[in-house]
């Protein structure tokens, strides 16, 4: 606009200068007209200078605008570099986690190692040679083992999908832990899980083995054969306040079952009410399991170790019972108040459709199907039960963590690396399993009238030290009292009835654990 105005003014001035002499020339004779000046007109020089100055100003303005555009482009590129750098640099929570939140991708390698050492005593302190009453004395006493060596990863995928993959390399073999694909609904309290994971059976079962108050889960989880299985599960939960949880699923056999006769299955249901009342967190719930044995091996065995897996020996054992399946009902309770926690569970299992001797023979002789009954025949359906009660307390002020219907990792208030002593917790537990039941009227304590699996009462105490969140050291003492069962038949006073013979065993175990 400025440039056009200046040029217009100069042109107007030039026109005025030219028109004045022309008018005078018309009034005077041609001879008297003055000769045209030979020097340049000052107005022309001024116009040229003004135009040149205007051009330079415009060029300067264009250069400034170009530089501004280049700076803005550099700033935008720098922000992109920063964004990519944030995506490339992992966060750290026990291990590196790579995440692109905008795209929905995340990846976190994970794992843990547990090293156990301990002692399992001999019945009533009497060491013997070889195997007696089915008990191998060589596998008692001192022992050590790598309990778990787990490596895996977890993360998310675009579209609200998630995954977890874990492999256990302990004992020189490869076993499968959680291998799960999940989908989390954005606008509904629903999550779907598909893969190899624990059926929804109890607080102890659903809590990771890394976070328990004892080295091993309660004995009923061992006796009643709670293992991971291939299946699909639905979970309805309060995603905002974590005040309720309902889980349901249907499962096949474990993923490491290499056979092609995977006809066994299980249906599970678990419901919890988990409110926070002031400074107290409650956990109240129930669970139910319906299980059918493999058609080609219709039988199930119930047995439990003596509070530790330092040994492979079981003091209580039903042997394999010929049956089509079982049903289990359990109740759950827990409470956390500041540094104190209590927990208790009980479960009862009803063996379903046990085979009598005549039924077993007829079933196995029938060529019309693939049903094969396996194990000891009985004259009725037995039932067994188990449970525990525990109390624990943090001496260093922590509160036991709880989330999503299970115990979670507790945050250490004063970790070792910051000059503190870490977290120190003491726990006590009473553990009980009863695998004996009468199924028919008789004075004998043997099949097919009586299941003499035995009763095991465990008294346990543990001390847990977490110097930091991801390192744990545990020491545990347990005393086991066994009544009846197959091991007591040839080991104690033979004058007593088979279901009244007793012996005691002391156990001690320690664990060092690291996870990431």
Image (spheres, rainbow, N blue to C red):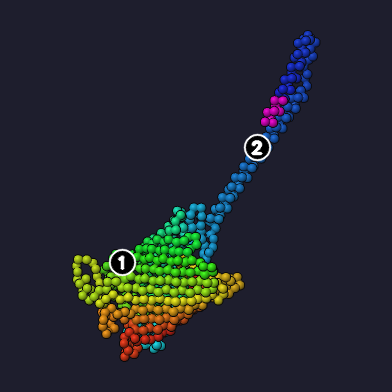
The answer to which quarter of the image holds residue 255 is: bottom left
Asked if one can make out residue 466 in the rendered structure from this viewpoint, the answer is no
The disc placed on residue 264 is: 1
Q: Earlier in the sequence, mark 2 or mark 1?
A: 2
Residue at point 59%, 50% (across, down): 78
Judge from the rendering whether residue 93 lies leftward or rightward of residue 44; answer left or right: left
Pick the residue in front: 328 or 408: 328
User: Label 2 to label 1, Cα distance in Å?
Assistant: 80 Å
Residue at point 33%, 68% (across, down): 290
Pick the residue in front: 375 or 105: 375
Disc 1 packing (10 Å; few <14; some 14–19; many ≥20)? some
Task: Using the image, determine if residue 64 lies above or below residue 414.
Answer: above
Q: Secondary structure at mark 1?
A: loop
Residue at point 47%, 64% (across, down): 243
Q: Secondary structure at mark 2?
A: helix
Q: According to the image, label 2 marks what residue?
A: 62
Q: Position of residue 209 (x, y in %)?
A: 45, 71
Q: Is residue 330 in the magenta section?
A: no
Disc 2 packing (10 Å; few <14; some 14–19; many ≥20)? few
Residue at point 30%, 70% (across, down): 325
| Predominant SS of the magenta segment | helix
Residue segment shown in magenta: 1-9
Query: Marks 2 and 1: CB-CB under 8 Å?
Result: no
Q: Position of residue 421 (x, y in %)?
A: 58, 74
Residue at the front extreme?
A: 277
Q: Is residue 6 in the magenta section?
A: yes
Task: Using the image, determine if residue 38 lies above or below residue 477.
Answer: above
């Amino acid at each position: 606009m400025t440039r056009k105005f200046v040029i217009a003014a100069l042109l107007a001035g030039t026109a005025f200068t030219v028109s004045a002499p022309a008018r005078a020339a018309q009034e005077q004779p041609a001879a008297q007209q003055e000769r045209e000046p030979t020097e340049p007109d000052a107005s022309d020089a001024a116009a040229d200078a003004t135009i040149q100055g205007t051009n330079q100003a415009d060029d300067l303005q264009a250069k400034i605008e170009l530089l501004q555009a280049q700076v803005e482009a550099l700033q935008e590129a720098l922000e992109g570099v920063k964004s990519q750098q944030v995506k490339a640099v992992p966060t750290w929570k026990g291990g590196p986690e790579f995440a692109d939140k905008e795209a929905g991708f995340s990846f976190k390698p994970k794992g843990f190692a547990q090293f156990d050492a301990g002692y399992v005593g001999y019945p009533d302190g009497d060491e013997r040679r070889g195997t007696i009453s089915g008990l191998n004395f060589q596998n008692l006493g001192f022992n050590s083992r790598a309990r778990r060596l787990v490596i895996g990863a977890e993360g998310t995928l675009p579209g609200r999908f998630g995954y977890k993959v874990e492999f256990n390399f302990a004992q020189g073999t490869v076993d499968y832990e959680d291998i799960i694909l999940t989908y989390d609904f954005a606008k509904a309290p629903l999550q779907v899980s598909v893969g190899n994971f624990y059926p929804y059976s109890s607080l102890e079962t659903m809590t990771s083995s890394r976070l328990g108050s004892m080295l091993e889960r309660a004995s009923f989880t061992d006796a009643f054969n709670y293992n991971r299985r291939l299946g699909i599960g639905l979970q309805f939960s309060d995603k905002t306040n974590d005040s309720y949880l309902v889980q349901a699923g249907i499962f096949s056999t474990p993923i490491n079952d290499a056979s092609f006769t995977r006809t066994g299955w299980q249906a599970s249901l678990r419901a919890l009410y988990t409110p926070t009342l002031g400074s107290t967190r409650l956990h109240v719930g129930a669970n139910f399991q319906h299980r059918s044995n493999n058609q080609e091996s219709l039988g199930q065995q119930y047995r439990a170790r003596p509070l530790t897996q330092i040994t492979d020996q079981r003091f209580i054992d039903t042997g394999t019972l010929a049956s089509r399946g079982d049903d289990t009902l359990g109740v759950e309770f827990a409470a956390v108040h500041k540094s104190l926690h209590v927990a208790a569970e009980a479960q009862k299992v009803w063996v379903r459709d046990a085979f009598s001797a005549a039924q077993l023979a007829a079933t196995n002789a029938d060529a019309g199907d693939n049903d094969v009954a396996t194990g000891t025949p009985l004259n009725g359906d037995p039932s067994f039960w188990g449970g525990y009660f525990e109390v624990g307390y943090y001496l260093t002020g922590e509160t036991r963590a709880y989330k999503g219907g299970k115990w979670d990792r507790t945050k250490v208030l004063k970790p070792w690396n910051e000059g503190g002593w870490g977290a120190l917790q003491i726990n006590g537990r009473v553990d009980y399993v009863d695998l004996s039941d009468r199924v028919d009227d008789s004075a004998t304590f043997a099949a097919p009238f009586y299941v003499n699996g035995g009763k095991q009462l465990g008294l346990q105490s543990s001390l847990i030290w977490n110097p930091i969140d991801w390192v744990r050291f545990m020491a545990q003492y347990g005393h086991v009292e066994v009544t009846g069962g197959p091991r007591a038949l040839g080991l104690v006073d033979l004058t007593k009835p088979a279901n009244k013979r007793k012996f005691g065993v002391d156990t001690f175990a320690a664990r060092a654990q690291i996870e990431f």
